[in-house]
Image (cartoon, rainbow, N blue to C red):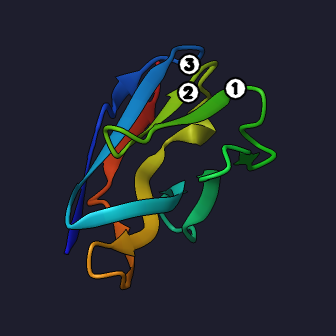
Amino acid sequence: QVQLVESGGGLVQPGGSLRLSCAASGSIFSINAWGWYRQAPGKQRELVAAIPSGGSTNYAGSVKGRFTISRDNLKNTVYLQMNSLKPEDTAVYYCNADGVLTTLRHFGSWGQGTQVTISS
């Protein structure tokens, strides 16, 4: 199985920055795509950013120009650099990995979530 461990959440003031990390471990052959999602209280989980193996990135309109997703394939890690944070960015952030195990079976895994709170 594959485990994803997130880190980097916390409390910051509006306009501040945070960098989230998510490291995958387990019997991984390859990770095809990473995604960062978030879920605010009372709202559905939404895609924030995604990066496939080809390297092209996708962002939700609300974060475009402020957030940057990147990946380190050697470390099986994905990052989310979040700048110019706003109170509406407050949510639990989850990473997701989609890939192939060493058994050549497909996997899809979620992290446990990390809280991001933007408040003065």
Cα–Cα span, label 3 and label 1: 13 Å
The crowd level at tag 1 (other Cα within 10 Å; few <14, some 14-19, many 20+) is few
The crowd level at tag 3 (other Cα within 10 Å; few <14, some 14-19, many 20+) is some
The three-letter code of the residue at mark 1 reads Arg
Quadrant where the image shows the N terminus: bottom left
Using residue 12 as the reference point, say whether residue 51 is left or right of it.
right
The three-letter code of the residue at mark 3 reads Pro
Q: Say which mark, if any, is on residue 66.
A: 1
Q: Which of marks 3 and 2 is nearer the N terminus?
A: 3
Using residue 93 as the reference point, say whether residue 86 is left or right of it.
right
Residue situated in front as seen by the camera: 29 or 39: 29
Q: Which of marks 2 and 1 is nearer the N terminus?
A: 1
Q: Which x, y percent locates residue 50?
A: 63, 52
Cα–Cα span, label 2 and label 1: 6 Å
Q: Name the residue under label 2.
A: 82
Q: Nearer the viewer, mark 3 or mark 1?
A: 1
Residue ID at (44%, 23%): 18
Q: Mark 3 points at which residue?
A: 14
Using residue 6 as the reference point, say whether residue 50 is left or right of it.
right
Q: Which x, y percent locates residue 83?
A: 60, 20
Residue ID at (62%, 59%): 47
In this view, 40 is above or below 21? below
Q: Count all numbered tags in the image, as a single digit.
A: 3
Q: Which of marks 3 and 1 is nearer the N terminus?
A: 3
Question: Which of the 4 quarters of the picture holds residue 29?
Answer: bottom left
Residue situated in front as seen by the camera: 93 or 36: 36
Are circles 2 and 1 on residues that touch, CB within 8 Å?
Answer: yes
